[in-house]
Structure formats: structure tokens, C-alpha cells
Image (tube, grey):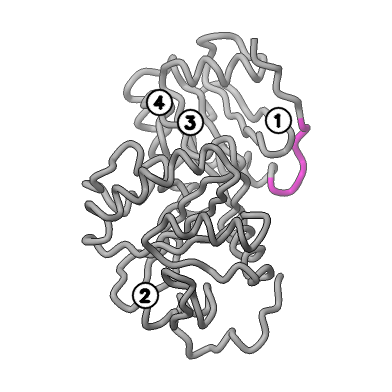
Amino acid sequence: SVALGPIENPDAMPLVKLLGEKLLAAGGKTVSTRDALKSASTVGLYFSAGWCPPCRGFTPQLVSSYQGHLEAKGLRCVLVSWDRSPADFQDYFAKMPWLALPYEEEERKNMLNQTFNVRSIPTLALVDASTGSVITTEARESLVRDPEGNEFPWTPPLVRDLALGNPGRINEQPSLICLCEAVGATGHAEVMQALTGVAKEAKASGELELSFFVGSSGSLCEQVRALCGLAPGGGPQLVMLDIPDNGGFYLGPSGHDVLKEDGIRQFLADFKSGRLQRKQLAPPK
């Protein structure tokens, strides 16, 4: 863990603990974090850099949504820069109507990258302004889908269905998937209930950042099966994708027993303890 010294005042508001006592406003003016964010209901940490083409593409979208809709809903943004020099940071920050973490705060930037599991940019993570708790690290994708913020703050479901076509952060963190295309609507509901119970436990423990998926149908299920060398449309199968680990994956139980909460819980425990055999995802064809 990163030691940040006296700024970790136990009486400080959660956002001050997270971001430090001071932030930068337009023109490079130093402002109090407490005062600058006191009217926020939600704070967006925008991990971005001017050298990054996807960032340059997304920033105007974020500015437009922020000024047109999201600021009025209580969002306040803070740039966490991945720029490579102070001058680059200043040039990029000048395009934004919000706050920034001071460029020289390297230790704090590293801590935030670790805290929010930032592996690529742009990433927009939202935190609750009153508690500092994470709402979502997928706000970039949510904003592109919902630029007016009708569903803001985009709290993600504990369990997604791959059939809906949204892979969440499957490329950024380990993802437990129950492929169950052939079991029918009743089986899908049973799997969703079982996975939700395990996901609630995992979230409460805070031990490991995980995504949870039901695979009831669709092209994403087909892709997962192909990457893992599984027969198309096969029976129920538990899979742990760990794409951040250089494309690793782990196979769990198969058959109708995988639809039970106890079997899913044991598979997750085996993964966390290192008892499973790592396999390598096949290259896409």
C-alpha cells in the first residue's frame, strides 16, 4: 500500500482522503478539495491523457454530456492525468471544464490507478461523494450509451447476461461465467439467482475485483466457447476468464450441478486459492 502521510486525516471527508487536500481548477488555480466538491453527489475520476487517441475521441463527448446534463445531476469530474509532461498535462487539462489532481502527485495517482484497477485509458470511475465508495468503473461505456444520463449514475448489475451484448470489464478483470445456453428460461433464472448470491458475497468481502456473467445465448457466448476450446452450444459450464493475466482461463464443473450456488462458490474459492489449472485462451480466428 502507498503511505500518504498526514493527508490521511481520520476526520477528513472521504473525498479528501481519496484525492488530497488540494485540486486544480481552470487556469491552474489551487482550490480546496472540500470546497470544490461540497455540492457534488457523485465524483467522476477521469483517467486520461492527451497522447491517447481514444481519450481525445472521448473527452469531447464527456464535456458535452457534462455541460449539457450531468453537472446538473450532481456530477463533478476530476482529471487523473496519464500525460507524460507538465506541459502536456496543462494543454490537455485546458480543454476540460472541471478539476484535476495536481500533476506532481505521483504517489496519489499510482494509488488511484491501483484502487480503481485502471489498466487502460480512458477510464471514467464514479464514486459516491458522501461515502467515497465506488459506484462504477464503467462510466465511460455507460456515458457513450446514455449521453443524457437518464440512468445516471449507472450502477452496474451484480450479474450480467452476455446475451445482452455488454461485456462490461471482462477484458480488465477476472470474470466468472456460467455458460448455460441449453438449459432454458427456468435454468437461466436459477443460474442468475445462484450467481447473484455468490456475487453479493464477493462484493461484500472486497477480496478480489470480479465480474460475474450468465451466458444464456448470443455471439458473446459463442466467442467465449471458441476461445476456451469448448464445443458450440454445449452443456452448462463454469469458466473463469482472466484476460488481464495474458489471456488465461480456468475451467470449472460442467453439467447441471454448475447451476447451484454451492458449486459456483467452490469454483470461486478454488480460483482464489490457486487450486485450478491455468489454461491459455486460443487466439481469435
Do callouts 4 and 2 mark residues in contact (Cβ within 8 Å)?
A: no
Do callouts 2 and 1 mark residues in contact (Cβ within 8 Å)?
A: no
For the residues labelled 3 and 2, the Cα–Cα distance comes to 45 Å
Residue at image mark 3:
259
Comes first in the chain, label 4 or label 2: 2
**In the picture, which quadrant includes the N terminus?**
bottom right
224 left or right, relative to 147: right
Residue bounds of the magenta highlight: 272-278
For the residues labelled 2 and 1, the Cα–Cα distance comes to 40 Å
Q: What amino acid type should be assigned to the residue bearing mark 3?
A: Leu
What type of secondary structure mainly makes up the magenta span? loop
Q: Secondary structure at mark 4?
A: loop
Residue mark closest to the camera, 3 vs 2: 2
Disc marking residue 165:
4
- Residue 98 drawn in magenta: no
Residue at image mark 2:
37
